[in-house]
Image: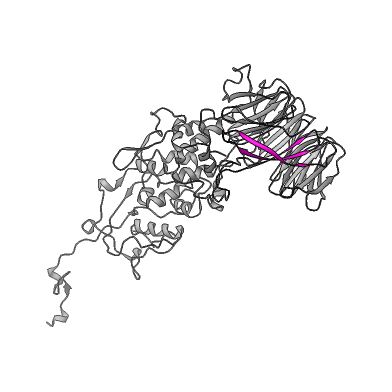
Amino acid sequence: MHPSDLDLDIVDGALSAVPHSFTITRPSSPSPSMDFSIISPPSPGPDHNNFSDIFAFSSRGPSSSSASFFPSATRHRRFHTVHSSSYALPQISSSKSMRALFPRIWDALSSPARKGKGKGFYGEPYTLGADCSYADLQPLDGEEGELIDDEACFMDGDGPLPSGIDILALLPPELSVHILRYLDLPSIISCQGVSHTWRVLADDSAVWRELFHRRAGWGIDLERALARGWSPESLSVYPTVSRSSRHDSIATNEEGASSRPIHNLGAVQRCFSLAPSPWSPELTYSTLSDKPFTSTPSQTTPLSLPWCAIYAARATLDQRWAVPSLPLSATSPSAGSSAFKPHATWIAGHADSVYCLEFDSARIITGSRDQTIKVWDLAGGQCVGTFKGHKGSVLCLKFEHDWDVVRAGDETGGRKKGFMVSGSSDRTVCVWDMWYGKHGEVCAKVTAVLRGHMGGVLDLRIDRQYIVSCSKDAVIHVWNRETLELHRTLVGHEGPVNAVGLQDGRVVSASGDGKMILWDIESGTRLRTFEGHERGLACIEFKDDYIVSGSNDCKIKVWSASTGECLRTLVGHDALVRALSFDPVSGRLVSASYDKTVRVWDLRSGRMVRLFRQFHVSHIFDVKFDSRRIVSTSHDQKIVVLDFAHDLNAGLFT
């Protein structure tokens, strides 16, 4: 018989053949009944394993609901190995987008589909090289590397732990931290309880810096803080909770030594376990997905700062403002016992009523009926300067805040001078230069006197270009700040102009005739007239598109400057609303009245948050606030400072 007529089988791995009758045929592998891949590709439908959200989560921001980091725990998973030299992590250029990176990671971690036509993460067939599809490969049996019912690769879906892979541990740390930067505070706290690896990643300063800058109204001024003696080491005085807290532990370095205590994470949790603060809401997921991260210069918010402790301190400070609106008085300390009681300081030194005040991070400046202007040290309350330039009561003043702080790029170098203007019942506006003396005292001198009003000057505003003054004579004067020449006179009110606001070349004026008028400085035209109060207006604030007015009708109204619409009316005071201070970013408003009370309002809800009474014993004339304190002045000749951060080193915060 010719060899070509024989039924021969090629011997595997040898250059020879044998008759078929001499061979033994091994049974084929059983038909698969389930998918043996490490991670099953997500299937459509509301109940699919939402692992794909992780990839979208990293490239364009989280969805409105938190993405699951683990596959479903209700299914049994079986893994197998793949022996192929071509099955390796692809080399990805650092210039590739996040969206291009994760499908490759998916393909590297996934094994061939065993049933049907295999599909990739974005619908492409799984491929092994240029011409081979995973779906076309024969199934593996136990001798070829498949692990069947191996204890190390069998995940029990009924156990306490979810099945799946630790995606954050597999990724480079920089990428894992970047993913965590998209999460909100509750999610970060949850991540810290997953594992040691997740704890280290979630503790990263980049994560907490992002959380901090995502909060509306939160900011820091590092140059100012350093100039005032602030140091990161002082953060250790912030409140801590028991070490038994699951999230309040000590991070360790590679050698196992304590590297940095996470003192304040428990304080953060404690803050947000209470009623949520009406201020500083975090941006929503949808907003985060549409907008880039907050861009902050590295020199003002360096990553080396202890951001977790900074976040905890700022959250604690906000929570102290946001408490039930129970009355708190100086004479009844038990009143409002559930509320945080700010530390109160009374400053005395003027010989008559204190009509006006301004303050910054170092000093309070007040004007009085005794015709003097005094400068007080904010920390200790000592008088560090007294000036006299007016021949009547000092009714209003404004100055450049933190003028002595040397900033990056300042050409003046060392000592700097401050700029101040004051208005008086003597009908003049005085322009002052201020500086520090040899012994730390504040000195000042009048450099110019602006004349033109026919009545007492009741209010002032300044910006880089203008000085705006208003008077009992119903006239508003706009002065050029550089030349001190009269730039524009605005006439239109029928009564004394008690207050003005200035912003972006526009002036808003509030008058005893019950009207508010919005003016354009350059043209001198009237843009809009606001009417709604039942009696004359006493005070006004103009910031962003909001105008807030206080009146003798005991009401506060919030207006839209662009539409003229009254957005909200706040009712609560029992007498004339004499002074307002407003932060449009946080929505916090502080008002003072002749009813001897200071009230804190949340403008988003219109709710009165805090009520302070009996700290003054007479009419309150002026009030100002920042992130940590409220300062008020009164007919009782006193200045009262209510400090919400007395036991916190909050000098870093704006």
Residue beneath the point at 28% across and 48% down = 153
- Check the image and name the residue furthest to the bottom: 2
Residue 543 in the image: above or below residue 110: above
**165 is within the stretch colored magenta:** no
From the viewer's perspective, tell me whether residue 302 is left or right of residue 79.
right
Q: State the predominant SS element of the stretch in magenta.
A: strand
**442 is within the stretch colored magenta:** yes
Tell me residue 615's x, y (percent).
66, 22
Tell me residue 311's x, y (percent).
49, 38
- Check the image and name the residue furthest to the right: 494
Number of marks in the image?
0
Q: How is the image coloured?
A: one colour
Determine the image quadrant of residue 644.
Answer: top right
Residue 28 in the image: above or below residue 214: below
Q: Visible in this render: residue 50?
A: no
Determine the image quadrant of residue 557.
Answer: top right
Q: Is 351 in front, or is 573?
A: 351
Q: Magenta residues?
A: 422-451
Q: Is 305 in front, or is 282?
A: 305
Tell me residue 563's x, y (percent).
76, 47
- Check the image and name the residue furthest to the front: 438
Determine the image quadrant of residue 462.
Answer: top right
Residue beneath the point at 29% across and 46% down = 154
Q: Visible in this render: residue 74?
A: yes
Tell me residue 63's x, y (percent).
52, 49
Residue beneath the point at 36% across and 65% down = 127
Q: Is 481 in front, or is 119?
A: 481
Q: Quick one: quadrant of the C terminus?
A: top right
Q: Quick one: quadrant of the N terminus?
A: bottom left
